[in-house]
Image: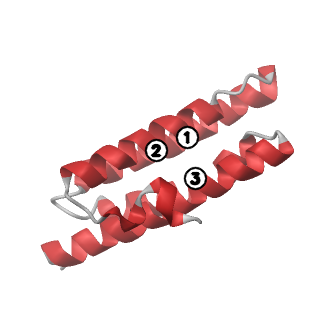
């Protein structure tokens, strides 16, 4: 069983990796023009984060939200493949804002903020 401190460390680690992957996916999408890179980089981390966090009493809802984001990336990738309409970049921005709210609400260190994770 995890303690609350362990759960918070897991949350911080998940957010740090997601933030770094978001920045990387944005840069790579800007270079290549392929918004499906968001899905390739973020979905596996979202699924892993969901698995790690849903077992926590304190962060169960965040884990569920991570699973919802992962599913949304799959749906929007299908939309991109059918209609070539980029809604993936918008979803990444929504995920970024969601992570910022989590960090603020849980008073997490700013070392995992999007602007500082990859510099």
Which element type, helix, strand or loop, lies under badge 3? Answer: helix
Q: Quick one: 78 or 107, which is closer to the camera?
A: 107
- The answer to whether residue 18 is seen in the rendering is no
- Which label belongs to residue 96? 2
Classify mark 2: helix, strand or loop: helix
Q: Who's the residue at 44% across and 65% down the image?
A: 16
Contact? badges 3 and 2 (CB < 8 Å): yes
Q: Nearer the viewer, residue 12 or 74?
A: 12
Figure check: 91 above or below 11: above
Label disc, if present, on residue 82 of the rendered structure? none
* Residue holding disc 1: 92
On residue 22, the disc is: 3
Q: Is residue 70 above or below residue 46?
A: above
User: In the rendered structure, are the residues bearing label 2 and label 1 in contact, judged by CB atoms less than 8 Å apart?
Assistant: yes
- Gap between marks 3 and 2, in whole Å? 8 Å
Q: Say if 82 sits above or below 59 in the image.
A: above
Q: Position of residue 22 (x, y in %)?
A: 57, 52
N-terminal of the two: label 3 or label 2?
3
Q: Are marks 1 and 3 in contact (CB under 8 Å)?
A: yes
Residue at x 23% of width, y 78% of height:
6
- Residue 110 coordinates in the image, percent (x, y): 33, 62
Q: For residue 84, which quarter of the picture?
A: top right
Residue sitting at 62 percent across and 39 percent down?
A: 74
Q: Position of residue 3 (x, y in %)?
A: 14, 77
The quadrant in which the C terminus is found is bottom right
Please state if 24 lies on the left or on the right of 113 as rendered: right
Q: Residue at x 20, y 49 (%)?
A: 105
Does residue 50 appear left or right of residue 74 in this picture? left
Question: In x, y percent, where is residue 39?
Answer: 65, 47
What colouring style does the render use?
secondary structure
**For the residue carrying disc 3, how many other residues have a C-alpha within 10 Å: few (<14), some (14-19), or many (20+)?**
many
């Amino acid at each position: 069983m995890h303690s609350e401190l362990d759960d918070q460390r897991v949350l911080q680690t998940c957010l740090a990796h997601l933030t770094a992957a978001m920045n990387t996916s944005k840069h790579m999408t800007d270079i290549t023009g392929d918004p499906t890179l968001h899905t390739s980089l973020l979905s596996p981390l979202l699924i892993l984060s969901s698995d790690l966090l849903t077992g926590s009493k304190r962060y169960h809802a965040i884990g569920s939200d991570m699973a919802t984001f992962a599913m949304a990336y799959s749906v929007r990738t299908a939309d991109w493949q059918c209609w070539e309409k980029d809604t993936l970049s918008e979803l990444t921005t929504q995920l970024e804002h969601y992570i910022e709210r989590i960090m603020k609400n849980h008073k997490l260190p700013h070392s995992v903020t999007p602007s500082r994770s990859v510099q």
